[in-house]
Amino acid sequence: MARDPSPLRYDFPLWAPLLQVVALLLFHGLLPFGVSALTARHGWSAGHPAAGNLLGLLPVASGAVLLTWVIVLHDREAPKHGWRVEATPFEPTQYLIASGPYAYTRNPIYLSHLTIWSGWAVFYGSVAVAAGVAVMWLSLTFVVLPYEERGLMRQMGEPYVRYQQHVHRWFGRRGAALL
């Protein structure tokens, strides 16, 4: 007797969220710290940041909050459409979220990465971390995002094209109605 397959697929092992948190902390915490050691830390004296450098913690915190918000949105939305861990992070998703931060940017995850790293560049006063932000933005803008957007257009068609016409790639809304 064949079992009726569940409409939802959970490929996420139980340890995966912990691994994801560790990876994010390494990428957004330890890596900028290490990169900052490659150049002088402007604004620092006696191993401590100046007050101006401390302002960099605001974008770090803002980016972390944005990233958490997006993860929660996906955690709520994905099961409605069949949760699926893609073979590669560059595979298009199976659903379109147009609310929350997605109403103002098509790429809140990447925007959060850039915001966090920009904050670290200010905090560490590091030209090397700022160069990392520039390289990240260039690779996202000219390599990753065009590839992902082509996949999303193939995957979702007209709804994604309307979404593109309504919400800017990085930040801002255009037009009156989305869907």
Image (tube, grey):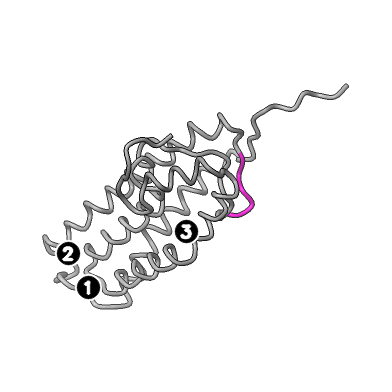
Task: Say which of 68 and 111 sits in front.
Answer: 111
Callout 3: few (<14), some (14-19), or many (20+) C-alpha neighbours within 10 Å? some
Q: Residue 19: give x, y in percent of width and height.
A: 52, 48
Judged by depth in the image, the label closer to the viewer, 3 or 1, is: 3
Pointer 2 or 1: first along the chain? 1
For the point 32% across and 60% down, the residue is 117
Quadrant location, the C terminus: top left
Residue span colored magenta: 84-88
Q: Residue 33: give x, y in percent of width and height.
A: 33, 65
How far apart are the two marked residues, 2 and 1, measured between alpha carbons? 9 Å
Callout 1: few (<14), some (14-19), or many (20+) C-alpha neighbours within 10 Å? many
Q: Residue 7: give x, y in percent of width and height.
A: 67, 28
Q: Residue 41 got which mark?
A: 1
Task: Say which of 69 and 171 sits in front.
Answer: 171
How far apart are the two marked residues, 2 and 3, measured between alpha carbons? 35 Å
Total numbered labels placed on residues in the image? 3
* Image quadrant in which you'd find residue 124: bottom left
Pointer 2 or 3: first along the chain? 2
Q: Residue 49 got which mark?
A: 2
For the residue marked with disc 3, what is the amino acid?
A: Leu
For the residue marked with disc 1, what is the amino acid?
A: Arg
Q: Residue 165: give x, y in percent of width and height.
A: 40, 47
Judged by depth in the image, the label closer to the viewer, 2 or 3, is: 3
* Helix, strand or loop under label 1: loop
For the point 51% across and 54% down, the residue is 149
Q: Residue 145 got which mark?
A: 3
Is mark 2 in CB contact (under 8 Å) with mark 1?
yes
* Helix, strand or loop under label 2: loop
For the point 35% across and 54% down, the residue is 170
